[in-house]
Image: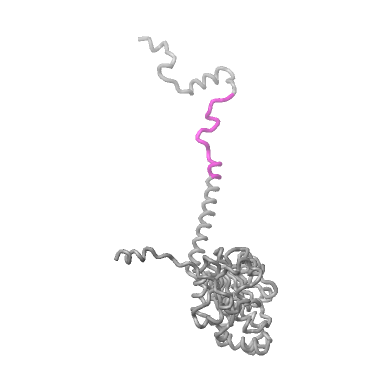
Amino acid sequence: MWILLLLPLLWVAPLDAEPVPRQQVGFPELVHPTGVEGVDEAIVVVPDDPRLGDRLRVVHWPGDGSRSDGVLRTLEVRPDLEGLPSGYPSRAVIFLAPDEERWRALTQGRAPHWGAGVAIPALRRIVLPVFQTPWDGFRSEARTVRHEWAHLGLHEYLGGLRIPRWFDEGYAQWVSGGGAFEEAWRLRLVLAGRGAPPLDSLTLQWPRERARAEVAYLLSATAIEYLARSSGSAGMELFLTRWREGGDFESAFRQTFGMSTGTFERRWLEDVRRRYGWLLILGQSAVFWLFLGVVLIVLFRIRRRRDREKMERLRAAEMPDFPAYWEPPTHPPIGGFRDEGRRRRSPTRPEERPVDPRDSEG
């Protein structure tokens, strides 16, 4: 009886599963890449979800089983991608790099130092660093998984066609839920300061610095969001289908959205300035009161400094309490007149006054 009651207290968390033999994991050439230290010790997880069981493998090292479960749960919620048929990507491996050495080996040095995840479509590989937590408000871990998953699906569906960088990143941001209103403060400040850069600048060279890269991600997300708002997911699906069949990005774009990419860029910039410019910032109540508070603080400090300077000028011009001409002269007196006059002006106590002979006469 007592033993049965104590059993729940003696429960121990199970250890990570044993590595699955190569012949049982499916597509072993992707699961066990060469040149990665300790890859034979890695644990391969096969999803139980039938929608992912034949398409996905998650590889992690001992101690990271909970992170692997989190990745699987994220993709089981929404395995399909907007604008693409079901089943893309058809084959993918997600590696959870336990340290920086294996992170560099698995990403082949393609990731920036602040990277939260890397997708390599040619290798059907996604690499996530679990030895650090680079995820923040800009991109959570779940959104990072969806983002990189979208990269693999889009590249596989288009079959090796050249994808503009702004469209590739914008599509992944759009699918993962990026470009939310609350996250666009940096974009609004950039637009208010110097305006939005052209899409070609994002296509030619993607920024490597974190701050500029985040702005580029947001800009790309707003471009795809603008297309999705005007045509919906059905329009995006039709565009991707025409692009895949014809192989020409510009032609498919014109047929689907009824405008050239140059016209789209001009309209997109106008939309971005209208939605993320200063007028929208001032229109938000919280921002308005914050802005008003800052203005009042600045005005208060200016007024206080001006009052302080005015008071200093008044004090410099007023008469002192004890002017110099009221004080005794600093030079020796000349003659007895001045000395006598000084004695007369100086107060004396009654017992120190000289005795007048007339006071003694009765």
Q: Percent position (x, y) of residue 83?
A: 57, 84
> Residue 326 or 147: which is nearer the viewer?
147
Query: Considering the image in quadrants, where does the N terminus appear?
Result: bottom left
> Residue 332 or 96: which is nearer the viewer?
96
Residue 207: in sight, yes or no?
A: no
Q: Is residue 91 above or below residue 338?
A: below
Q: Is residue 358 magenta?
A: no
Residue situated furthest right in the rendering: 204
> Residue 302 or 144: which is nearer the viewer?
144
Q: Percent position (x, y) of residue 84?
A: 57, 85
Query: Considering the image in quadrants, where does the C terminus appear?
Result: top left
Q: Is residue 326 magenta?
A: yes
Q: Percent position (x, y) of residue 224?
A: 59, 79
Q: Percent position (x, y) of residue 205?
A: 69, 72
Quarter holding residue 135: bottom right
Q: Is residue 30 above or below residue 2?
A: below
Residue name at image x 51 percent, y 51 percent: 304
Residue name at image x 50 percent, y 83 percent: 50
Q: Which segment did they paint magenta? A: 312-330
Residue 113: in sight, yes or no?
A: yes
Quarter holding residue 19: bottom right
**What is the number of callouts on the image?**
0
> Residue 69 or 349: which is nearer the viewer?
69
Tell me how the rendering is colored. Answer: one colour
Residue situated furthest left in the rendering: 1
